[in-house]
Amino acid sequence: MSWFKRTKKSVKAAEKKTLPDGLWQKCDFCNEILFAKELEKQLWVCSKCGYHFMIDTDKYIDILCDPGSFEETHRGIHPMDPLQFKDLKKYEQRIKESVKKTGREEAVVTGFARIQGRDVVLSIMDFGFMGGSMGSVVGEKVARAIGDATDHRRPLIILSRSGGARMQESILSLMQMAKTCAALSRMSEARIPYISILTNPTTGGVTASFASLGDVVIAEPRALVGFAGPRVIQQTIRQELPEGFQRSEFLLEHGMVDMICPRGKLRQTLEGLLSFLCVQIAETTQEAEKDEEDSSAVS
Amino acid sequence: MTTDNKDRPGAAASPFLDFEKPIVELERKIAELEQLASVQKISVDEEVKKLSEKADKLRKDIYSKLTAWQHVQLARHPLRPYTTDYIGEMSDDFMELHGDRAFADDPSIVGGLMSLDDKRIVIIGHQKGRNTKENLLRNFGMPHPEGYRKARRLMKLAEKFDLPIVTMIDTPGAYPGIGAEERGQAEAIARNLREMSGLTVPILSVVIGEGGSGGALALGVGDRILMLEYAIYAVISPEGCAAILWKNQEKNKDAAEALKLTSRNLLELGVIDRVIDEPVGGAHRDPKTMAAELKRVIYEELDYLQHFEPAKLVEKRRAKYMNMGFFAEDSA
Ligand SMILES: [Zn+2]
């Protein structure tokens, strides 16, 4: 059985977003029956095969941040429908349904947080909201988060999971790729660390923009990560895709990610990276403060 | 242009689109009449005038109400001029530079040094093939990562020697294949987007045909974005969009309409800065005139961009992209 078929199934299951409330939960990958309480303890990673269940944004906040330290920013930004897009359903309708289903305003949440006492800017995408697709709002919020990191001189962490650019905003979605990268260009000059975490699945315009540009790129095990989706590739080349194609392990082998990190070690890994990379920030910030003192002394 | 009609694909079968055929047919009749007149030394002025008027009316009728799908067809027209056709018309000293210095040379993107009258520029563009053999080489204008990396290398070269960059966009999209994924298609595109937003020389981007998603944008982060009148630019092809959202590839016409992909649509949305008019019937009906107009516009635009200090240019470019998009924000 190819990875691709399994992915399809796991994505479908994930779209239900929250795990059913039952005592038992079946692993989407190996079909093992898991005790829900135990699964939660394992951060929704199958104890038998290591499959990472898709989890809600709030759960990632709990896993990554110091308790209670997350402060959401840039709330109250809502999608519009500038193209008046309608396929089988109106775009407006799809947005309404996603808001209702996820309880979120859009497919990304941004905020300030602390990791082991260190101030960071954190941004987490939500696959449940129209497949985590990037339209004008996601582009704006991600760009603002990048701006916050740059202006406050705090490291940036973006956790991605997305089907790519949002078709219903056509060219405007495409331009969000350029927008987030323009923000990263400025941030890169300011020498602020950016760590990108790729989770299952991250494809299309999100992979082809900010998600691939981390100073360090981390992937969760077995996450599907790529530019084109497996189905499109299969239709184009008309042959079976190799085992494990476009999975994190494949990306590591081909030099596209720095490391694969299981969910249980994400926080510890982030802390290690940040403490190493943020020395620069601390020094620069001190210098800037010193400069300010000096100049105020002169005037 | 570099090719005669007889060398063009489908010269035997008609390469013209259904909605073009009545016009082409009338034009052929007029040409025949005129030839007949010159051979037999008779006057056909009256007849020619009548037919010409009819052709004019027909053109106006057809081209004043083109559907979105017809724009798509024109943008992909088999006779439409490609990047190297324009380069050949605009300059006689183009020097092509090859390779990404890492893996390969990707012929679906061409780039190099060229003069534009008294200006020296670096020009980079997608390149489609005119026939099957050329398309095998050019991969139908669908680049692999090495194409984007070559483009970036040439842009860095332009920056180093203070040369403005002109990009020509004409691709169905970045190639979706195994090798492309292995070598980091996404990263190659992403890096171009970031690097282009920080380059200290002017960047002028012109969509000359098909602007296919991220594979197009990877050459398209410019200070000014221009489109030829019948070029298209969207996040996904109408066929791809129809397959996903309508779950039916036959709905490509509906998808083309919904995607708002014409040059006028994009100008209204504020995404592009200028539409360059095409000759009546499209660029392929009069490539020389199109190339001359394109050259004039590029020259004029570069004149304008070369006024800005490098730091100002970067600041303006970043601000331009930071302003892209529509959303509603609650008042605090
Ligand atoms: Zn399992």
Image: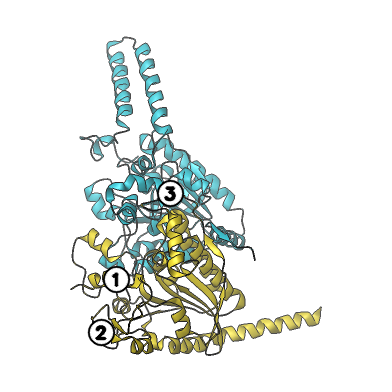
Chain colours: A yellow, B cyan
Question: What is the chain letter for disc 2?
Answer: A
Which quadrant of the frame does ligand 1 lie within? bottom left
Indicate the quadrant containing the N terminus of chain A: top left, top right, bottom left or bottom right.
bottom left
Foreground of the two, B30 or A226: A226
Q: Which residue is disc 3 drawn over?
A: B207
Q: CA distance from mark 1 to mark 2?
A: 35 Å
Q: CA distance from mark 1 to mark 3?
A: 28 Å
Asked if residue B86 is positioned above or below residue B164 in the image, the reply reads above
Question: What amino acid is at disc 2?
Answer: Ile
Provide residue A225's location: percent of width, then percent of height.
Answer: 34, 72
Question: What amino acid is at disc 1?
Answer: Glu
The mark lying in front, picked from 2 and 3, is 2
Indicate the quadrant containing the C terminus of chain A: top left, top right, bottom left or bottom right.
bottom right
Q: Secondary structure at mark 1?
A: helix
Q: CA distance from mark 2 to mark 3?
A: 54 Å
Foreground of the two, A122 or B276: A122
* Residues behind callouts 2 and 3 on a single chain: no
Provide residue A9's location: percent of width, then percent of height.
Answer: 26, 71
Q: Which residue is disc 1 drawn over?
A: B182
Residue drawn at point x = 24 percent, y = 70 percent: A4
- CB contact under 8 Å: marks 1 and 3: no
Count neighbours of disc 1 (C-alpha within 10 A) and say few if under 14, some if 14 to 19, many if 20 or more.
Answer: some
Asked if residue A124 is positioned above or below residue B72 in the image, the reply reads below
Question: What is the chain letter for disc 3?
Answer: B
